[in-house]
Amino acid sequence: MQFCDPYTVEAFRAKQELEEVGVPFLYLETDYSTEDVGRLTTRIQALVEMLEVGEKGRV
């Protein structure tokens, strides 16, 4: 079970708003351990690629 905090609620609202206007959203959860670095790096790189592809489509 995950801890429910205000950030989770706000992230849900932000995700809805961003998706409505076609902006990709990335929600990251981590325990700030070094084991997370590879997974987080991959997810962030994927988001950057999505943003780049989206930007090229708007030109």
Image: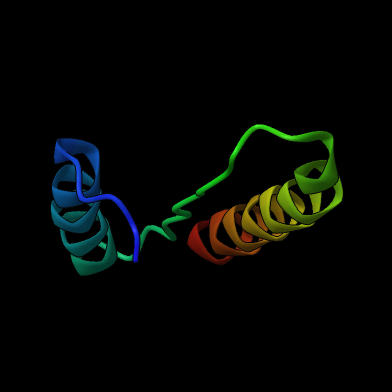
| Above/below status of 55 relative to 53 | above
- Total number of numbered discs in the rendering: 0
Q: Which residue occupies the foreground of this view, 46 or 22? A: 46
Residue 43 percent coordinates (x, y): 69, 57
Q: Residue furthest front?
A: 1
Residue 54 percent coordinates (x, y): 55, 62
Q: Residue at x 16, y 44 (%)?
A: 10
Q: Is residue 8 left or right of residue 24?
A: left
Q: Which residue occupies the foreground of this view, 35 or 52? A: 35
Q: Is residue 23 left or right of residue 37?
A: left
| Above/below status of 16 relative to 51 | below
Q: Name the quarter where the C terminus is drawn.
A: bottom right
Q: Name the quarter where the N terminus is drawn.
A: bottom left
Q: Residue at x 83, y 35 (%)?
A: 34
Q: Residue at x 28, y 50 (%)?
A: 3
Tell me which corner region of the image, top left, top right, bottom left or bottom right, holds residue 18.
Answer: bottom left
| Above/below status of 9 relative to 31 | below
Residue 50 percent coordinates (x, y): 62, 62
Q: Which residue occupies the foreground of this view, 30 or 55? A: 30
Q: How is the image coloured?
A: rainbow
Q: Residue at x 14, y 50 (%)?
A: 9
